[in-house]
Image (cartoon, rainbow, N blue to C red):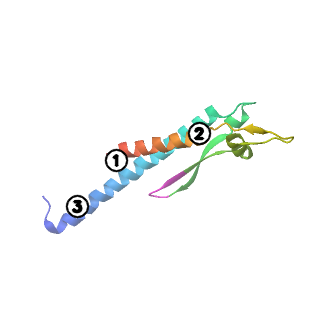
Amino acid sequence: MTSIDDMADVIMKGLAEYADLADTEMKKAVKKTAANVKKEISANAPKLSGGYGKSWTVRKTRENSHTLEMTVHSRNRYQLAHLLEKGHAKRNGGRVSGKPHIAPAEAQGEKLLTRMIEEALS
């Protein structure tokens, strides 16, 4: 049994435990989502030689005790990402249409992350 004097300490301890659990679950969700987005981009990327799709990777950008930031990027073909996603003008006139492969993966990743965090916190 807890006395009234100790109640604030017990409540703060419970909140700290919940915050730690929430941070852990959030970080797991971010890591899984980043890996899923990378996989989707690689799978749906335009394929000429296959090097562009294989160049996508996930990197931890920033992490502290409460946050985790992951970046999905192309290691060595980053110059092509915008051109292939949005399309570009040809040298002698005309236009090459884009093949959206980054934006759909990002949108799906946002939905997945939201769902995973809601499930973990409920």
Q: Helix, strand or loop at disc 3?
A: helix
Spot occupied by residue 99 in the image (x, y as percentages of width and height):
67, 36
Callout 2 amino acid: Lys
Q: Indicate which disc, 2 or 1, sits on the residue closer to the N terminus.
A: 2
First to last magenta residue range: 64-69
Splitting the image into 4 quarters, where does residue 96 fall? top right
State which mark lies toward you, 3 or 1: 1
Q: Which mark is residue 86?
A: none
Spot occupied by residue 91 in the image (x, y as percentages of width and height):
85, 42
- Is 85 covered by the magenta stretch? no
Q: Indicate which disc, 3 or 1, sits on the residue closer to the N terminus.
A: 3
Give the alpha-carbon distance from disc 2 to disc 3, as whole Å: 42 Å
Note whether 7 is above or below 51 in the view shown.
below
Q: Nearer the viewer, residue 97 or 73?
A: 97
What residue is drawn where x is 13% and y is 64%?
A: 3
Q: Which mark is residue 38?
A: 2
Callout 1 amino acid: Leu
Residue hosting label 1:
121
Q: Quadrant of the N terminus?
A: bottom left
Q: Which mark is residue 10?
A: 3
> Badge 2: how crowded within 10 Å, few (<14), some, or many (20+)?
many
What residue is drawn where x is 50% and y is 53%?
A: 68
Q: Indicate which disc, 2 or 3, sits on the residue closer to the N terminus.
A: 3
